[in-house]
Image: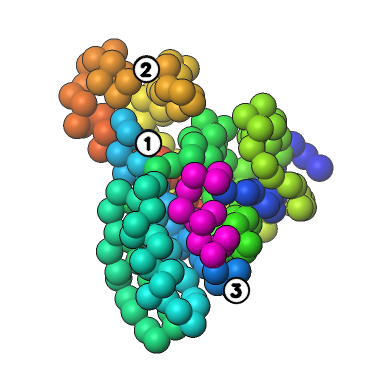
Amino acid sequence: MDSSKPSLARIKIKFPDQIWISEIFTKFHDIRMEIINFLPYDLEKSIGNAVIEIMHYDVDSVLQVIKNHSSVFEFSVLEREVNKVKFNVKTKDPYLLYGVIKCGVLVNFPVSVREGYAYWRLVSTRERIDELLTLFENKNINFELLRIGNSPYGLDEDKFKLSLEESKVLDKAINLGFFEVPRSISLEELANKLGKSKSALSVMLRKIIKKKIVFES
């Protein structure tokens, strides 16, 4: 396989016990869940913003557990049916996506979640995917590579491309350890080094991250 061409990897990742999703699957074994989208919300506090859809015969009980979980900062229902609900939740990001950002790997949404495991489809070069999996191993993240092969998707679309300024900002953020866990530099310190305001840098980083991790086939 040519390591410079796009690859598609399917991996199975266990959510950390302290995240609300782990508790949901412990209490409701027959729940069905999809992560429609997930992006960083508060870069300084490592809070992510997710849109989730769940199906269960007792949706009210599931929602009650989610709303009361210590890892959840904000919660709101977007759509509701008898046994299905779509909601927005802001929660502590367990740094999985920060690894994806650092390695330059796209996540193909939606992500299916079963029995507390997320089944990710990752699109990038073989080299970058290998780099991400090595990072997961070094961080003792519970994952399993299910399959890897040639990707039917290209990576040369304009929606994935960064401007020259965005590329420089991302490189600086990575090199200074902004995406490390724990973080080596704060958002304010990074903004000062780049000669930008903290708010302007936050907006730019969110735009960069959306381009670099969200893949919708």
Q: CA distance from mark 3 to mark 1?
A: 30 Å
Q: Label 2, on which residue?
A: 185
Q: How is the image coloured?
A: rainbow
Give residue 200's mark: none
Tell me the amino acid under the disc marked 3. Answer: Asp
Residue 157: % across, % down:
49, 50
Which quadrant, please, contains the N terminus?
A: top right
Q: Foreground: 98 or 104?
A: 98
Query: Residue pushed farthest bottom?
Result: 82
Q: Residues within 10 Å of mark 2 (few under 14, many from 20)?
A: some
Q: Which residue is drawn at the image coordinates 50% and 78% (left, top)?
A: 56
Query: Residue pushed farthest top?
Result: 193
Query: Residue pushed farthest right?
Result: 1
Quarter of image, res 185:
top left
Q: Label 3, on which residue?
A: 30
Quarter of image, res 130:
top right
Residue 29 versus residue 156 in the image, above or below: below
Which stretch did the figure color magenta?
Answer: 16-27
Q: Which residue is drawn at the image coordinates 43% and 57% (left, top)?
A: 37
Q: Label 1, on which residue?
A: 46
Q: Foreground: 169 or 86?
A: 86
Task: Label 3, secondary structure: give it.
Answer: loop
Q: CA distance from mark 2 to mark 3?
A: 42 Å
Residue 55 visible in the shown view: yes
Q: Give the mark toward the camera: 2 or 1.
A: 1
Q: Is residue 17 magenta?
A: yes
Task: Label 2, secondary structure: give it.
Answer: loop
Pointer 2 or 3: first along the chain: 3
Pointer 2 or 1: first along the chain: 1
